[in-house]
Image (cartoon, rainbow, N blue to C red):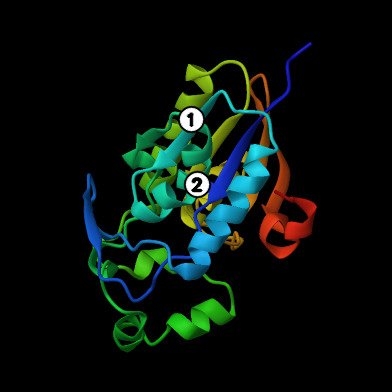
Amino acid sequence: MTEERRIYLIRHGKADQRSSAHATTPRGVTADPPLDETGRVQADTLARRLLMMPPPAAIYCSTLTRARQTIAPYVNATGAPVLYHDDLAEWHGGDWELKEFEELLVEHPEIPQRILFQDPLFFLAPGGEAFAAFQDRVIAEIEGAVAAHPRGDLWVVCHGGVINAYISWVLGLGGEQEMFFLPPNTSINTVKVLGERRVLWFLADDTHFTAPELFPD
């Protein structure tokens, strides 16, 4: 009988949108804001929940600051090792990186209409990472982690786009579904690993933040 285990895809906490911090990734310079005050509270409440769960076989994390700071309270409490990987970083927006949203609206006045009708946006970004390439690196990274740790659960601390890219592959949605749901900050999105099968189990679980009384100290 195949052992059931899980991949917990954890989105980072709320980032400081006023920050101009940036980092260099293999795909170029990218916005790299830290968590804001709300995000730090979210990370603390997430840690309380994670401390109630069995320790994972491994923790993988994006190299970007908001993801690193999200798992930091748990790491500080447990000393757990974390594997940081560039390929878990968010989709790279090319010329959109480091621009204010207001600037994008001037350059692409069709954005509000596309958001209204839930239509794709990534292709609008000049020099942006092709979605197929983005999805390929995300799948390779997460599936590589599964292969490297054949027993136990995996925690992957990452970004909304990364979670969408992997889960859309699990669901077989195809390349047109670049963003089909919006994971809340610090939400846990769970995929079961059943041998070679991947089965979606739970999405957008942020009850540690919305109902913290369920996860007392």
Label 1, secondary structure: give it.
loop
Q: Position of residue 161 (x, y in %)?
A: 48, 55
How many numbered markers are drawn?
A: 2
Identified at 27% across, 75% down, the residue is 99
- Picture coordinates of residue 146 (x, y %)? 53, 24
- Within 10 Å of disc 2 (Cα), the crowding (few <14, some 14-19, many 20+) is some
Given the image, on which type of amino acid does mark 1 rest?
A: Ala
Residue 73: assigned label: 2
Earlier along the polypeptide chain: callout 1 or callout 2? 2
Give the left or right position of residue 139, taking residue 20 as reference: right
Residue 154: which quarter of the image? Answer: top right
The kind of residue on which mark 2 rests is Pro
Mark seen at residue 80: 1
Question: Where residue 38 sits in the image (x, y, percent)?
Answer: 52, 68
Q: Position of residue 175 (x, y in %)?
A: 50, 51
On screen, residue 69 versus residue 125, left or right, reads: right
Name the residue rendered at 34%, 86% in the picture: 102
Q: Secondary structure at mark 2?
A: helix
Eyeballing the image, is 5 above or below 68?
above
* For residue 110, above or below residue 30: below
Could you tell me if residue 93 is visible in this image? yes
